[in-house]
């Protein structure tokens, strides 16, 4: 992102604020700066900057003029739509938070898509420098409380709180079949995010675990009966299958109509496997939990750009009443990158 610092900043007296902001923005080349050099060259504040900062500002000014770049962010004391120095410092000292239900368990999925779809390496660089963090909401029922608390930290600044929050929410759809309506708790979260202009993404599949490529699941040792039955499912069935628990331990015909319609074509032997076996048992027997251990498979060498895309290749084949985004994962990375 290119940050423009207006000449009126240099006409003021807040050298400490200006110097602080320049250090934040330019540290390790985090952002490009545009300062209209001819208008600030003779100002007292510019002359007080370190020589390295003055040389950097001049170099970036020449580069911006040559490449005709447009700023993506504006710092000014007089423009209503811009941030003043205090607002800009508060904004840029916070990392961009990718807010998840559980940052420890869901983080591997997000790291995997960043690793494999971040073409320019910008997000990876921000992660390395802690300019991106994973925010832990503490469960889907706590998204609103978590974000409300974050918004309140900006209550003393002049603009509406949401202007200062650097956050992107990613949450599971929790759908058990394609045409299932969003549950009321999820609707309340979406309503809150929209009211507060917080960008978000509801995953197409049931949970983040459902994006794990078949190749990685096939590499799980033991529990072959369950894994082989899972691999025989159709792609859309894998999208909504409960990888942790399998089928509820009851007669298939007692399940809801949406689940029955989705899995009706599964052979009877595999249905029996899904009722009596689960991946949760595998981890429980070794004193671990599915939610903490299964996501680590996203670090597997079997997870690549190609296998992740393969796992989503059928998205474009969905009926019109439930259109999937065939470019969901790369598009998600692009949306996060725009916030940086």
Image (cartoon, rainbow, N blue to C red):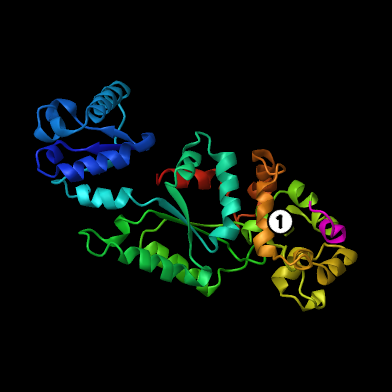
Does residue 192 appear to the left or right of 63 in the view shown? right
Does residue 234 appear to the left or right of 192 in the view shown? right
Q: Is residue 223 magenta?
A: yes
Residue under label 1, please give it.
Answer: 236
Q: Nearer the viewer, residue 222 or 334?
A: 222
Does residue 279 appear to the left or right of 109 in the view shown? right
Give the image location of residue 153, x and y in percent: 30, 64
Whether 108 is drawn above or below 30: the answer is: below
Residue drawn at x 28%, y 53% as measured from the top left: 90
Whether 20 is drawn above or below 42: the answer is: below
Which quadrant is the C terminus positioned in?
top left
Residue drawn at x 51%, y 45% as measured from the top left: 333
Q: Is residue 143 magenta?
A: no
Q: Is residue 142 visible?
A: yes
Which quadrant is the N terminus positioned in?
top left
Residue stretch in magenta: 220-227
Give the image location of residue 292, x and y in percent: 65, 62
Q: Is residue 324 visible?
A: no
Q: How many marks?
A: 1
Q: Nearer the viewer, residue 180 or 174?
A: 174
Does residue 124 appear to the left or right of 308 in the view shown? left
Q: Nearer the viewer, residue 243 or 87?
A: 87
Give the image location of residue 10, x and y in percent: 13, 37
Give the image location of residue 6, x and y in percent: 18, 38
Image quadrant assignment for residue 107: bottom right
Whether 105 is drawn above or below 117: the answer is: below
Say few, some or many: other residues with alpha carbon within 10 Å of mark 1 (under 14 / 14 to 19 / 20 or more).
some
Image quadrant assignment for residue 171: bottom right
Residue drawn at x 9%, y 33% as measured from the top left: 44
Residue drawn at x 13%, y 45% as measured from the top left: 14
């Amino acid at each position: 992102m290119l940050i423009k610092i207006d000449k009126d900043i240099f006409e003021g007296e807040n050298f400490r604020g200006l110097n602080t902001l320049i250090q934040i923005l330019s540290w390790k080349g985090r952002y490009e700066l545009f300062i209209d050099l001819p208008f600030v060259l003779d100002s007292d504040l510019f002359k007080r900057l370190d020589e390295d900062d003055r040389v950097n500002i001049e170099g970036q000014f020449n580069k911006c003029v040559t490449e005709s770049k447009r700023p993506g962010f504006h710092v000014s004391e007089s423009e209503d739509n811009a941030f003043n120095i205090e607002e800009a410092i508060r904004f840029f000292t916070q990392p961009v938070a990718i807010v998840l239900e559980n940052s420890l368990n869901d983080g591997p999925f997000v790291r995997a898509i960043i690793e494999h779809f971040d073409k320019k390496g910008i997000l990876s660089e921000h992660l390395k420098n802690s300019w991106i963090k994973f925010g832990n909401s503490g469960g889907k029922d706590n998204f609103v409380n978590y974000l409300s608390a974050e918004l309140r930290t900006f209550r003393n600044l002049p603009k509406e709180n949401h202007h200062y929050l650097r956050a992107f929410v990613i949450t599971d759809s929790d759908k058990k079949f394609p045409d299932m309506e969003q549950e009321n708790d999820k609707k309340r979260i979406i309503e809150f995010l929209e009211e507060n202009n917080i960008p978000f993404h509801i995953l197409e599949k049931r949970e983040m675990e459902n994006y794990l490529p078949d190749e990685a699941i096939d590499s799980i040792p033991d529990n072959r009966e369950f894994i082989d039955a899972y691999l025989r499912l159709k792609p859309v069935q894998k999208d909504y299958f409960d990888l942790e628990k399998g089928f509820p331990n009851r007669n298939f015909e007692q399940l809801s109509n949406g689940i029955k319609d989705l899995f009706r074509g599964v052979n009877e032997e595999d249905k029996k496997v899904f009722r009596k076996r689960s991946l949760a048992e595998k981890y429980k027997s070794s004193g671990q939990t599915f939610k903490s251990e299964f996501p680590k498979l996203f670090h597997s060498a079997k997870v690549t750009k190609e296998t992740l895309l393969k796992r989503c290749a059928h998205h474009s084949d969905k009926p019109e009443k439930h259109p999937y985004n065939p470019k969901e994962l790369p598009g998600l990375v692009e949306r996060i990158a725009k916030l940086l």
